Amino acid sequence: MSVAHHSNATPLIEVDHLAVSFTTPNGGVVEAVRDVSFKLHKGKTLGIVGESGSGKSQTALSIMGLLPPNGFVNGSARYDGRDLLGMPAAELNRIRGDRVAMIFQDPMTALNPFLTIERQMTEVLQLHRKMSRKQAFERAVQMCEAVRIADARRRIKMYPHEFSGGMLQRVMIAMALLCEPDVLIADEPTTALDVTVQAQIIELLRDLQRDLGTAIILITHDMGVVASLCDDVMVMYGGRTMEYGSAQQIFEQPTHPYTIGLLDALPHLDDDCDTPLRAIAGNPPSGGAAVPGCAFAPRCTQAQAHCGEVRPELLAFNRADETLRLRACHVPIIELQSATRVGSAV
């Protein structure tokens, strides 16, 4: 079903029944994303969470039209009422990097090692804003200063390998925000950064969102980052949505065994130093493996006999605050909460 949002405003991004698959060299088909829907409004942040291989990044790359040649997408992804999927390349290029921008997971592979940071940034402005090289340079310096890169006028003339990981991530954010996009897709923006730099990046995104009204899709496996930044959360597993709701609801009243497992695996402030972390047993399904029932059933401590045979629908239910929630699970919420210890994440 389509995801409804608590706001009546027109969403900037509206994704309906998105499916992503890949053909393999032996002629097989791998399904990476199955029937994913969500909406994103101006100035809001949607967190897409889940373990590696859950379909988070493929969801984002399909929206941006960046799938490899063996990738195929179905469904719709509308930006400002226009479907990005199947849009002619020339038209998509006018939107991509301008109105909808993306911060990639690994800045060292996303940036061209043979071009200075300045050249890579000014190209964007010359293409989308028709600026002169001098105007583009000044704007690039201004944006680097906005993301708190010290001595930006000098450092912008350096090459990617001359920057630390944290500084490169700031460069990527600056590049993505050059044209003041309506939507920013951030794919694991704090991966491999130390906690101090992580906190600075999160604060930076929050400040830029407040100043520019940018809507953000934050893709991560870090529930702490989600708690710090997101308004709504979509929990994915095996290419499907397991649970959807506001960040407050997800953290205070998770209703899916997978969400509960993710939160319970976090260290808690009231734990003793020798308290072992509570890991989710087993491993995620291999990419695109066909599962007749719930993909999480083999790892779920609350799984019932039919969970592995019948796929649960993503259904809406209302809590006391009457805000729409979605979950795909056969286990009744009351049974689940009485059987599981739910920990707070922040």
Image: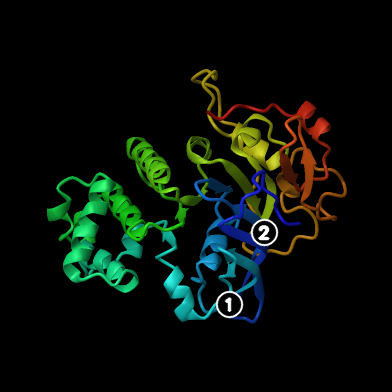
How far apart are the two marked residues, 2 and 1, measured between alpha carbons?
A: 17 Å
Q: Residue at x 22, y 65 (%)?
A: 136
- For the residue labelled by badge 2, is the local secondary structure a helix, a strand or a loop? strand
**Label 2 crowd (10 A; few <14 / some 14-19 / many >=20):** many
Where, quadrant-wise, is the N terminus in this rendering?
Answer: bottom right
Display colour scheme: rainbow
Residue to which mark 1 is pinned: 86
Regarding residue 280, the answer to whether it shows in the image is no
Position of residue 229 in the picture relative to residue 9 (left or right):
left
Residue to which mark 2 is pinned: 36
Amino acid type, mark 1: Gly
Q: Give the answer, above or below, for where 343 lies relative to 18.
A: above
Q: Between residues 224 and 119, which one lies in front from this camera angle?
A: 119
Q: Residue at x 85, y 55 (%)?
A: 310
Count of marks overlaid on the render: 2
In which quadrant of the rendered view does residue 334 lie? top right
- x, y percentage for residue 160? 23, 60
Q: Give the answer, above or below, for where 339 lies relative to 147.
A: above
In which quadrant of the rendered view does residue 293 lie? bottom right
- x, y percentage for residue 249? 65, 34
In which quadrant of the rendered view does residue 124 lie? bottom left
Residue mark closest to the camera, 2 vs 1:
1
Position of residue 51 in the picture relative to residue 294 (left or right):
left
- For the residue labelled by badge 1, is the local secondary structure a helix, a strand or a loop? loop
Q: Between residues 139 and 271, which one lies in front from this camera angle?
A: 139
Q: Give the answer, above or below, for where 168 lies relative to 262.
A: below
Of the two numbered discs 2 and 1 on the same chain, state the one appearing first in sequence.
2
- x, y percentage for residue 103? 40, 57
- x, y percentage for residue 294? 77, 52
Residue furthest to the left in view is: 154
Amino acid type, mark 2: Val
